[in-house]
């Protein structure tokens, strides 16, 4: 059985042809539908291997028919040596045979799924009629976040800030190309002026405060995506105490999210319960809501399934010979005999 393969080139071409905004809208819907059936999934906090430089994580889940996992890293100092902070790839598999069905690049797909999840959450939590978003952190995720909020929520004006002027230049250039109304601020304290939504997407392996509590006005929705690892947060703890906090999967977020610095019984609401109408979400226009996003396996599963439905049988996917399949399932060794010669023998001769 051949396995679908989507590499970086094919992913880029698919996004360019289909349109990032259209994909973000469709992906937000796909993720929302999976949050509607949240109870159908196997759920476990992701498995993290920490090092002084960053983290490597495995994120598995299954709905009983399909299984998915993502390999992802987070290394905030990587850009200094020309590498991405976050890279990823993922696999979809058939639960009934256990065979993988798709292998895909997920560095770009993760940026899409993170932005789509953020925008989906904001559609449930931000004030109706939200128009202005402040963006703190203009790295790899920034344009995806901006486009998702434009396409899904109707945000039409952006204010942005980054400690790195080159990242600000890059975001400004890309915003112009994308036709986004984006205002560069000179002083970080001005970035939140008039904001309905504040997105924090910085990368620094420390308990930073990238958004001061006195910059958070009543009624704002905070989309906090950069605090996603132990010892790596972005918000002032006072803001969390003033806000209603929404999370993906509590056992994972208590370790990795903004709430890691709060007591173990700090009250949070899981987003699925808002999506399913079990919890009302935002209660009034003065409430401060925080989506304490860390990224959860179900979002990657939704993204992989959506991708497979889009690219199967198209030029955006090739197939690879990933699974050994001898005609006699018990004769695996038979596959090592090539043109009458055993590969084991060839290996032994050092050929
Ligand atoms: P990146 O390294 O490309 O960009 C981060 C940007 O933050 C850089 O431009 C940096 O200069 C800026 N920055 C750092 N400290 C700052 C500060 N105090 N104020 C303003 N700007 C500051 O990283 P990225 O790929 O864009 O990811 C951003 C963050 O989002 C990372 O922390 C990453 O781990 C996280 N992330 C979360 C999810 C999720 O699902 N929640 C998914 C992907 C990435």
Image: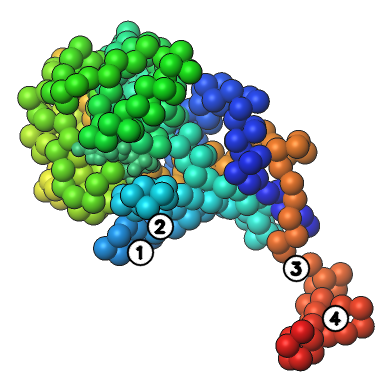
User: Is 199 on the left or on the right of 259, as rendered?
Assistant: right
Mark carried by residue 49 = 1
Mark 3 vs mark 1, CA separation in Å: 30 Å
Circles 1 and 2: CB atoms closer than 8 Å: yes
Q: Nearer the viewer, residue 11 or 49?
A: 11
Q: Earlier in the sequence, mark 2 or mark 4?
A: 2
**Residue 295 in sight here:** yes
Image depth: mark 3 or mark 4 in front: 4
Q: Secondary structure at mark 3?
A: loop
Q: Earlier in the sequence, mark 3 or mark 4?
A: 3
Q: Secondary structure at mark 1?
A: strand
* Mark 3 burial class by Cα count in 10 Å: few <14, some 14-19, many 20+: few
Labelled pair 3, 1 in contact (Cβ < 8 Å): no
Q: Residue at x 63, y 46 (%)?
A: 7
Label annotation for residue 57: 2
Image quadrant of ligand 1 equals top left
Image position of 1 with respect to 342: above or below: above
Kindly check if marks 3 and 4 are in contact, taking CB atoms under 8 A apart as contact: no
Report which residue position mark 4 lands on. 337
- The tag earlier along the polypeptide, 1 or 4, is 1
Q: Cβ of disc 3 within 8 Å of ligand 1? A: no
Horizontal and vertical percent position of residue 40:
49, 44
Q: Residues within 10 Å of mark 1 (few under 14, many from 20)?
A: few
CB of mark 1 within 8 Å of CB of mark 4? no
Q: CA distance from mark 3 to mark 4?
A: 13 Å
User: Dot 4: few (<14), some (14–19), or many (≥20) neighbours within 10 Å?
Assistant: some
User: Mark 2, residues whose alpha carbon is within 10 Å: few (<14), some, or many (≥20)?
Assistant: some
In the displayed structure image, the side of residue 220 where residue 48 appears, left or right: right
């Amino acid at each position: 059985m051949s396995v679908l393969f989507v590499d970086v080139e094919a992913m880029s071409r698919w996004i360019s042809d289909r349109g990032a905004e259209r994909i973000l809208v469709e992906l937000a819907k796909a993720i929302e539908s999976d949050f509607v059936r949240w109870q159908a999934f196997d759920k476990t906090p992701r498995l993290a291997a920490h090092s002084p430089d960053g983290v490597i994580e495995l994120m598995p889940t299954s709905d009983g028919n399909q299984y998915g996992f993502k390999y992802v890293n987070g290394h905030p100092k990587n850009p200094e040596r020309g590498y991405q902070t976050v890279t990823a790839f993922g696999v979809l598999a058939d639960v009934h045979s256990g065979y993988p069905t798709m292998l895909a690049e997920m560095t770009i797909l993760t940026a899409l799924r993170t932005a789509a999840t953020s925008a989906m959450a904001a559609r449930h939590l931000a004030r109706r009629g939200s128009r202005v978003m402040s963006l703190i952190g203009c790295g790899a995720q920034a344009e995806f976040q901006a486009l998702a909020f434009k396409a899904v929520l109707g945000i039409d004006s952006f204010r942005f800030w980054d400690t790195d002027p080159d990242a600000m230049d890059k975001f400004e250039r890309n915003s112009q190309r994308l036709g986004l109304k984006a205002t560069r601020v000179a002083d970080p304290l001005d970035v939140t002026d008039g904001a309905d939504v504040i997105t924090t997407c910085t990368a620094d392996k420390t308990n930073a405060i990238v958004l001061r509590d006195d910059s958070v006005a009543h009624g704002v929705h905070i989309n906090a995506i950069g605090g996603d690892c132990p010892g790596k947060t972005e918000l002032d703890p006072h803001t969390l105490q003033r806000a209603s906090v929404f999370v993906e999967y509590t056992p994972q977020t208590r370790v990795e999210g903004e709430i890691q610095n709060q007591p173990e019984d700090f009250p949070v609401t899981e987003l699925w319960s808002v999506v399913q109408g079990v919890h009302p979400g935002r209660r009034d226009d003065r409430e401060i809501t925080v989506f304490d996003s860390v990224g959860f396996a179900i979002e990657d599963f939704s993204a992989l399934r959506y991708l497979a439905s889009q690219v199967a049988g198209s030029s955006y996917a090739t197939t690879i010979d990933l699974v050994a399949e001898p005609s006699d399932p018990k004769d695996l060794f038979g596959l090592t005999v090539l043109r009458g010669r055993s590969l084991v023998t060839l290996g032994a001769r050092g050929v």
